[in-house]
Amino acid sequence: MAGVSPSTLRLWESQELIQPLRTETGQRLYDRALVDRLKHIAWLRSEKGLNPAAIRETLRDLPEADDDAGEAEDDASDIRPGTRMRRLRREASKTLETVAQATGVSISQLSTFERTSQGLSFTALHEVARHLGTTLASLSGQEEGRGGESLIREGKWASWPTTSSGVAVQVLAEGRNMMECNRFQLAPGASSEGAYQHEGEEFIHMLSGSLEIILDGDQFFELHAGDSFYFESRRPHSWRNISSGETVLIWINTPATF
């Protein structure tokens, strides 16, 4: 469709000209907007003779295709996280460019997430949610309802969108509660993709696999199945699955600032 070879696509990805979505197994996905971007890159390369750095600069100056002008209103019944994020952004009268500048997340990544609820790292999701005055739990629909009793049967969990590195989060307690209780399922190599911080306290209990947590950028903790860990959320923290297989853990945040 773009008139280039698979090896060229991989090259452009390594040069950070494109950022395709990924399935849990690592397969690349290309939506219509990304295919259009590919065609434009191919034209800049062949017709203009631009190098990767010049192409990146040219693409950065292009207006985002989804700039709200002439776009249809959101379907009120659409409760996907990306749609929720777009509504909040529009209600705050913020453009994609404004959010991108404030959070350090690229316009193309933001636009892709609003359309597909995929493609953002865990840290990027947290930064965008904080900038829009909300939380990841609210974007995922976890805070709907009044709270109180919440019974969820095994395997019937609601899920947050899987991140670009393979972080899947299942909701263990629904409603507006003081505690946010989640089950994290981390694919090999999955991580927060950066550090983040917020108010509150956190508790982790490892079910399987191994996790490395870094606090304040210089304190390293290695957790294994059966281990528990507590820390204050205001400390910058990042994490990654350091096992060769899947890592599963229970993660509790309080209060609901996550």
Image: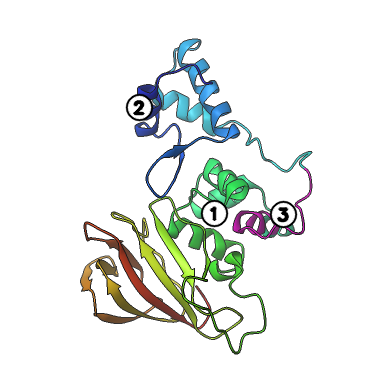
Q: Residue at x 35, y 23 (%)?
A: 7
Lower sequence index among marks 3 and 1? 3
Q: Which is nearer the eye, 205 or 233? A: 205
Q: Which residue is mark 3?
A: 90
Residue on which disc 2 sits: 11
- Where is the N terminus found, in terms of image quarters? top right
Label 3 or label 2, whichever comes before in sequence order: 2
Residue at image location 34% in from the left, 73% down from the top:
249
Q: Which residue, as the protein is rendered here, is positioned at the far bottom? A: 148
Q: Position of residue 188 (x, y in %)?
A: 29, 55
Q: Earlier in the sequence, mark 2 or mark 1?
A: 2
Tell me the crowding category of disc 3: few under 14, some 14 to 19, or many 20 or more residues within 10 angstroms, Cα based.
few
Q: Residues within 10 Å of mark 1 (few under 14, many from 20)?
A: few
Which element carries disc 2, helix, strand or loop?
helix
> In the rendered structure, are the residues bearing label 2 and label 1 in contact, judged by CB atoms less than 8 Å apart?
no
Camera-nearest label, 3 or 2: 2
For badge 2, the amino acid type reads Leu
**Secondary element at image label 3:** helix
Query: In the image, is 40 to the left or to the right of 202?
Result: right
Q: Is residue 95 above or below residue 198?
A: above
